[in-house]
Image (cartoon, rainbow, N blue to C red):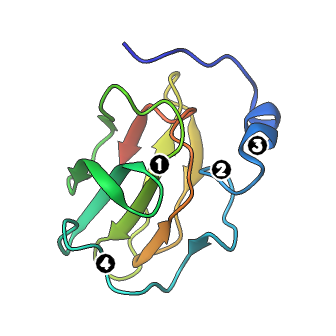
Amino acid sequence: MRTSYKFGLAAASAMLGLAGMLAPTASAQAQMVAAPSDCPKYYFCGYKQANFKELAFRFKDCYMQEIPDGLNSGGSWYNNQSTGTKARMYNKSKQLIYTTPGAPSSDAQGNWGPVWYVDAC
């Protein structure tokens, strides 16, 4: 079972240094280089490690899905869905905490700690 994180949005934002999952930054980019080879078109891909290493999941369906256990910190994501499609990330209480820029977009230096669910579109 994933570790529970008890903090408000402001505390989460501070913990992430505003470079993680909660706020678009220079690391969460709307235009990207080519997608990682293990993230096919029309998928939102989550990685255990920074820089799109160690694929943890691939979601393409439009409903809230729980991310795999073991994604408690660090990581990265790549949104390789249809152009302009945004993914949404939710906390343990299923509250929206971040919406990605439209595809293609990514964050090579994210933090899965506060994220429990992803809706790919």
Say what amino acid the circle numbered 4 marks. Ala
Identify the residue at image location x=48%, y=56%: 50
Q: Whole-Å distance between the Cαs marked 2 and 4?
A: 22 Å
Mark 4 residue element? loop
10 Å neighbourhood of mark 1: few (<14), some, or many (≥20)? Answer: many
As drawn, 110 above or below 94: below
- Residue that numbered label 1 is attached to: 75
Nearer to me, 109 or 41: 109
What amino acid type should be assigned to the residue bearing mark 1? Gly
Residues tagged 2 and 3 counted as in contact (Cβ below 8 A): yes
Label 1: element kind? loop
Could you say where residue 62 lies in the image, as x and y percent from the top left?
26, 52
Task: Tell me which label, 2 or 3, sits earlier in the chain.
Answer: 3
| Residue 112 locus on image (x, y percent) | 50, 40
Q: Earlier in the sequence, mark 3 or mark 4?
A: 3
The residue mark sitting in front, 2 or 4, is 4
Left or right of 70 in this view: 32:
right
Other residues around mark 4 within 10 Å, as few (<14) / some (14–19) / many (≥20): some
* Mark 2, residue position: 22
Residue 35 marker:
4
The residue carrying mark 3 is 13
